[in-house]
Image (tube, rainbow, N blue to C red):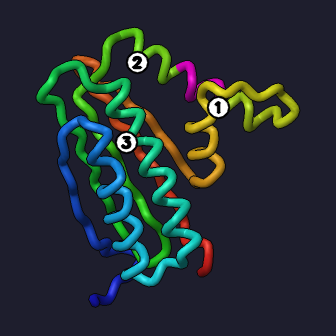
Amino acid sequence: MFSMDTQTPYVFKVKFPSDLDYVSPVRKFVAETLAVNKFSPKFAYRSEVIVDEICHNAIIHGSRTVDATVEIECKVFSDRFEFQVNDQGGKRDDIERLKHAMKKSDARLADASQEKESRGLGLEIVRLLSEEIKMEVGEDNMTTVRVVRKREDA
């Protein structure tokens, strides 16, 4: 075990094939790392749910080739957990659908009385459990989703 402060994080990266079979072990690894770093079981579980959703979306919508990969970079601070998921870029339609889902999620949070649809609820859950979520689309539609969660038991 090591000592952390709010400025010096424990950082790790995992790069894996764009295959749904890899998501479960990756999310479990993230949850176990948070548990070892004295985050609550509730925080670790909720983070695991978020990692699962973001990685799942990266594989389904951000993988155009058979040899595509997904990369997750995690930073564990004493007071928060930050991570970003990078995929190799989806088709233009997939990127537009993701942007639309992000906007709908924002609108739903602003108007909680709005009727719920089953599509896009994963991102809404991620938003509800996170302090911050940002999406960037770079060159060749490469997508990065960045999530920040603050420690709940501080």
Query: Does the segment drawn in magenta span residue 37?
Result: no
Query: Does the segment drawn in magenta span residue 101?
Result: yes
Q: Are marks 2 and 3 in contact (CB under 8 Å)?
A: no
Q: Which residues are magenta?
A: 100-105
Which dot marks residue 95? 2
Q: Nearer the viewer, residue 85 or 134?
A: 85
At horizontal 37% and vertical 82% (from top left) the residue drawn is 36
How many numbered badges does the structure rendering display?
Answer: 3
Residue type indicated by callout 3:
Cys
Mark 3, Cα crowd under 10 Å, few <14 / some 14-19 / many 20+, is many
Which of disc 1 and disc 2 is earlier in sequence?
2
Residue type indicated by callout 1:
Ser
Which of disc 3 and disc 1 is earlier in sequence?
3
Which dot marks residue 55? 3
Look at the magenta stretch and give its main secondary structure.
helix
Res 102 quadrant in image? top right
Which of disc 3 and disc 2 is earlier in sequence?
3
**Which residue is the site of mark 1?**
105
